[in-house]
Image (cartoon, grey):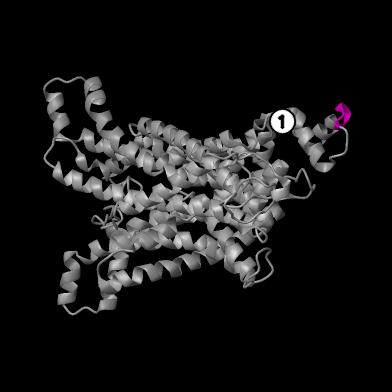
């Protein structure tokens, strides 16, 4: 047993440690990765009017110790970190640690309230399944899980705060200010958790032990409690990833509602180039993600108990919802027609006399603050958003196919990548290379490969263990022949389908970075940037915000419904070809780090979510 455990661990531990050191080193060396003179950045932050003379820059370098070079600065930062000293802000000159602690307290309060909302919503989605003993949470829960938090926050601000005036829309001055941000964060997380549990419950309730308990007169409540205990352990890792998603999503939600949390602090530090404050904030966000993953692993071990801990409890195959192809087809046609109509118009034509016009025949979706046609910018923004997402998707696919043959090495790197939501990676990349489309694409690519790599690794293991390949080896087939003619074709096709299904989610992640000012820059017509630009005049011209918001919602719906429709068709085709000497069922292997019970490679609930 010990040998098996040691073999399963492999080099994942050292890889995890090295990747963590690499992230910490990147954070510590941000002043040099940025390619800009740190002394000039400090001078501009302290006094924008002061002339950048060689004497002034030399004085700043002497004051901050920048002349010793990057390695010396990294060593000083690391030693200060061990003493609990995060340095001094370049902008305000105050200690960084109190600002980080203050922002962290606010963010933890917000995330706690959001988690409570998520649990309540998950209970509401799971309760009907427990009562009926069948069914799933269905498309409604999947749609909730796919809605981006920054989009839901914008809609909540517009409807509840602006139109209805029910709740405050900015600040942090009491419980009322907590409601809208907590709902915006908690609803997608609750949809995800509810769907995971509700999809797995029917298969568990059909197990033999449930029938025996009911025959013995055990009460319905006790059976339900035992079924939940049976369901939860394999799903806890997904709960941990949802908590990590809350960490990254809090950046956008705190920005929308002007909440002084650690996410908004990190974003403000990145935009002002206050690198010491940025280092402390990113370190706090990374620690939150790692702690969430560790707590998830601890909870799983406690739920399993000593008798089941080493057995790796798994769930029977879930019965996820299916949808008719007409739904994704309708959404695709609606998006296609809108985008095509917008591509026929000029997205950059400025007409100051036509500012903030409501929808009309001349401007079907109205105009923005500069008099530009919203429909035109929406159509051309699709090319920017989806085209960049396709490039990121292709890079992630290539990385996944390569790392699928090194699962033990990739596992440690996957843990660190999963602890970095796209927003945090985007902040780091923007601080180093500046905001832009390429930087946003790099940030999303750095953290989007783990699900695909896990899928590829599971398929490689399955194919290599097949009797068909054993026969090929027996007749003298070379390893290169087996790899190129059997293993790669069997792995590449389902992983490619998985990557295509993740395309909308990657597009939404890019949109979230554009919304935060970390992606495409004006005047590029990118969907997230359109939503951000419209916030300044959302009360006067809500259509400018609703147009990209509805487009993003349709994209999320297309991701979920398309995944369900494709999965149903794949299963039917796989059943028809069950006798072939190839692994047709590879379209749905379970990820090594994901629970059983239907969390398949091509059935990603997070296919349309930016925190995927």
Q: Is residue 40 above or below residue 206?
A: above
Q: Does residue 556 appear left or right of residue 425 in this picture?
A: left
Q: Which quarter of the figure is the N terminus placed in?
A: top left
Where is residue 435? Give x, y as percent.
63, 38
Occupied quadrant, residue 224: bottom left
Label 1 element class: loop
Closest to the observer, 188 or 420: 188
Which residue matches tag 1?
A: 36
Q: Residue at x 27, y 46 (%)?
A: 588
Q: As displayed, is residue 216 above or below residue 487?
A: below
- Answer with left or right where residue 226 lies relative to residue 379: left
Q: Is residue 131 depicted above or below 505 in this figure?
A: below
Structural crowding at the residue carrying mark 1, measured as other residues with C-alpha within 10 Å and reported as few (<14), some (14–19) or many (≥20): few
Residue 584 belongs to magenta span: no
From the top left corner, tell me how far across and down residue 101 is, in percent.
66, 56
Query: Dividing the picture into quarters, in which one does residue 105 lie?
Result: bottom right
Residue at image position (15%, 25%) is 473
Q: Residue at x 11, y 40 (%)?
A: 579
**Residue 400 in picture, x, y percent from top left:** 38, 34
- Nearest the eye: 108 or 122: 122
- Residue 54 lies within the magenta run: yes
Asked whether residue 27 appears in the rendered view, the answer is no
Q: Give the image quarter of residue 573.
A: top left
Q: Residue furthest front?
A: 361
Q: Position of residue 72 (x, y in %)?
A: 69, 31
Who's the residue at 16% across and 46% down the image?
Answer: 575
Q: What is the tally of numbered marks visible in this picture? A: 1
Magenta-tinted stretch: 52-56
Provide the major secondary structure of the magenta segment: helix
């Amino acid at each position: 047993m010990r040998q098996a455990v040691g073999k399963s661990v492999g080099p994942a531990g050292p890889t995890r440690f090295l990747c963590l050191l690499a992230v910490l080193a990147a954070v510590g060396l941000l002043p040099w990765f940025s390619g800009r003179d740190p002394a000039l950045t400090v001078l501009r932050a302290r006094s924008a009017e002061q002339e950048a003379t060689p004497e002034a820059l030399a004085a700043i370098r002497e004051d901050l110790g920048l002349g010793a070079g990057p390695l010396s600065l990294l060593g000083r930062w690391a030693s200060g970190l061990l003493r609990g000293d995060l340095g001094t802000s370049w902008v305000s000159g105050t200690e960084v640690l109190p600002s980080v602690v203050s922002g962290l307290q606010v963010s933890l309060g917000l995330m706690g309230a959001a988690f409570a909302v998520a649990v309540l919503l998950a209970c509401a989605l799971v309760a009907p399944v427990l009562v009926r003993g069948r069914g799933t949470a269905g498309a409604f829960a999947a749609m909730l899980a796919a809605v981006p938090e920054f989009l839901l926050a914008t809609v909540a601000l517009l409807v509840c705060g602006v139109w209805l005036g029910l709740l405050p829309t900015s600040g942090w001055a009491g419980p009322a200010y907590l409601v809208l941000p907590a709902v915006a964060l908690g609803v997608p997380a609750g949809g995800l958790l509810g769907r995971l549990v509700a999809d797995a419950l029917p298969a568990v309730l059909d197990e033999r032990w449930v029938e025996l308990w009911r025959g013995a007169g055990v009460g319905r409540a006790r059976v339900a409690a035992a079924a939940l205990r049976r369901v939860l352990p394999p799903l806890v890792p997904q709960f941990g990833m949802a908590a990590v998603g809350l960490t990254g999503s809090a950046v956008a939600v705190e920005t929308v509602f002007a909440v002084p949390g650690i996410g908004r602090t990190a974003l403000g530090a990145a935009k002002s180039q206050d690198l010491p404050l940025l280092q402390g904030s990113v370190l706090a966000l990374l620690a939150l993600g790692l702690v969430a993953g560790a707590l998830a692993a601890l909870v799983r071990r406690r739920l399993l108990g000593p008798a089941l801990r080493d057995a790796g409890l798994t769930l029977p195959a879930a019965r996820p919802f299916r949808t008719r192809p007409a739904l994704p087809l309708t959404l695709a046609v609606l998006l296609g027609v809108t985008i095509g109509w917008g591509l026929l118009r000029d997205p950059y034509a400025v007409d100051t006399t036509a500012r903030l016009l409501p929808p009309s025949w001349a401007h079907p979706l109205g105009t923005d603050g500069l008099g530009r046609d919203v429909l035109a910018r929406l159509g051309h923004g699709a090319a920017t958003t989806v085209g960049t997402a396709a490039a990121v998707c292709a890079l992630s696919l290539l990385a996944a196919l390569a790392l699928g043959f090194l699962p033990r090495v990739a596992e440690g790197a996957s843990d660190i990548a999963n602890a970095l939501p796209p927003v945090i990676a985007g902040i780091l990349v923007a601080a180093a290379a500046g905001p832009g489309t390429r930087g946003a694409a790099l940030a999303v690519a750095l953290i989007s490969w783990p699900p695909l790599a896990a899928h590829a690794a599971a398929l490689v293991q399955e194919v290599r263990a097949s009797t068909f390949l054993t026969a090929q080896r027996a007749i003298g087939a070379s390893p290169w022949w087996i790899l190129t003619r059997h293993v790669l074709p069997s792995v590449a096709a389902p992983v490619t389908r998985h990557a295509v299904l993740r395309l909308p989610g990657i597009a939404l992640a890019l949109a979230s970075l554009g919304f935060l000012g970390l992606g495409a820059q004006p005047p590029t017509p990118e969907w997230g940037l359109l939503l951000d630009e419209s916030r300044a005049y959302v009360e006067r011209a809500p259509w400018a915000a609703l147009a990209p918001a509805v487009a993003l919602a349709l994209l999320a719906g297309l991701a979920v419904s398309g995944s369900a429709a494709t999965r149903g068709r794949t299963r039917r085709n796989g059943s028809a070809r069950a006798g072939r000497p190839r692994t047709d069922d590879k379209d749905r292997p379970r990820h090594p780090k994901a629970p059983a019970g239907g969390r398949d490679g091509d059935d990603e609930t997070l296919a349309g979510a930016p925190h995927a």
